[in-house]
Image: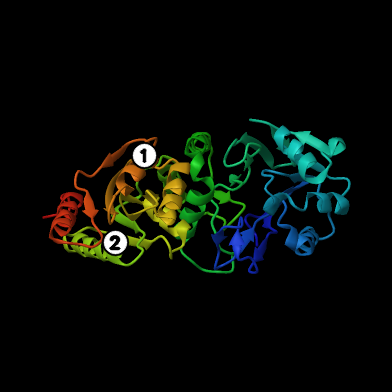
Amino acid sequence: MNITNDIKYIGVNDHKIDLFEGQYTVPNGMSYNSYAVIDEKIAIMDTVDAAFTDEWLDNIKNTLAGRTPDYLVVQHMEPDHSANIVNFVNAYPEAKIVASAKAFVMMKNFFGIDFSEKQIVVGEGDTLSLGKHNLTFVTAPMVHWPEVIVTYDSTDKVLFSADGFGKFGALDIDEDWACEARRYYIGIVGKYGAQVQALLKKAANLDIQAICPLHGPVLKDNLEYYINLYDTWSSYNPEEDGIVIAYTSVYGNTKKAVMQLADMLKSAGCPKVAVNDLARCDMAEAVEDAFRYSKLVLATTTYNADVFPFMREFINHLTERNYQNRTVAFIENGSWAPMAVKVMKGMLEKSKNLSYAEAEVKIMSALNEESSAQLSSLADELCKEYKK
């Protein structure tokens, strides 16, 4: 695949993987992207996962048609991108390795060698000339590892963005970009919004015509759309107006209340209502919904004087990723000593800029006239701006 006349795609698709990072389902696989910048000198941008050594080395050989690389640029040391550094060095012993100082420390940790005789250490604003192509390196610490750099080619105006602007899914699958990019961003990078914001500010000073991430498709058209989404996600603002209900239910009574509330919200004109059964759904999808929409309803049972385990896991995912700038409402079920609301509020107490609905729903075992009226009050409060 030609990115430009001089930049070629040499990555691979993985359809054998079941869980990315051992936790995220990837039904459409993953891509591990690598690129060749071909000029008077040749730079290979990152390697690929260890399972694809031969395919990747063949891609380099076939793309370069008899030439050999001069440089391997290592932007990110996660093994899905760095696993083949040693294999590259064995195949091309004359090539230099370009990376941040912290990346070389990590190479020593991963491989037992830091390639001291091959090192070109780069930091903020350093450049590497390949001929007519000049690469400028921009530090991106904690997006989402500390050693990360991104690289800008000022000739073709291409940003090699490391894990930024990546997504789940192999490149030979046609699917909506935003859905899987959002789940990828929030799950993997979401904790580091401040660092992403800092990188976006640096990128704003560059004339970018294409973005080449380490996962997912090369982005060329309507770049403002992708950059605006990253700005929204990394500033922790809602992407869309809507209400997410995340619930757990042991014997079905909490679920019954949730379904009634969802019907009330839809009838009141709420533009989007998403319901997630935390014991059965993809947890990453539920977390994605919570960050996507403007309001969240947490509904669960009191369990061992705490909350049901799946609800605790869900809230931990939110707070770990700096959940903020939302409206949160609560439904609790406790047959004899309701504690769920108190526990959930305590878990959220360090989250910034959360507002809580005044109406709370307390179910004592099963819905009755009183708790049904509380559901109605909660629906009215959450939907007041949607009513005509």
Mark 2, other Cα within 10 Å: few <14 / some 14–19 / many ≥20: many
Image: 365 above or below 197: below
Res 119 visible: yes
Q: Examine the image and state in which quarter residue 374 appears.
A: bottom left
Which residue occupies the foreground of this view, 262 or 225? 262
51 lies left or right of 377: right
Q: Residue furthest front?
A: 336
Disc 1 residue type (three-letter): Gly
In the rendered structure, find residue 346 and report the number of the disc placed on it. Answer: 1
Of the two numbered discs 1 and 2 on the same chain, state the one appearing first in sequence. 2
Disc 2 residue type (three-letter): Thr
In the rendered structure, find residue 321 and report the number of the disc placed on it. Answer: none
Q: Examine the image and state in which quarter residue 159 appears.
A: top right
Count of number-bearing discs: 2
Q: Examine the image and state in which quarter residue 133 appears.
A: top right
Q: Position of residue 155 (x, y in %)?
A: 63, 43
Q: Quadrant of the C terminus?
A: bottom left
Helix, strand or loop under label 2: helix
17 lies left or right of 112: left
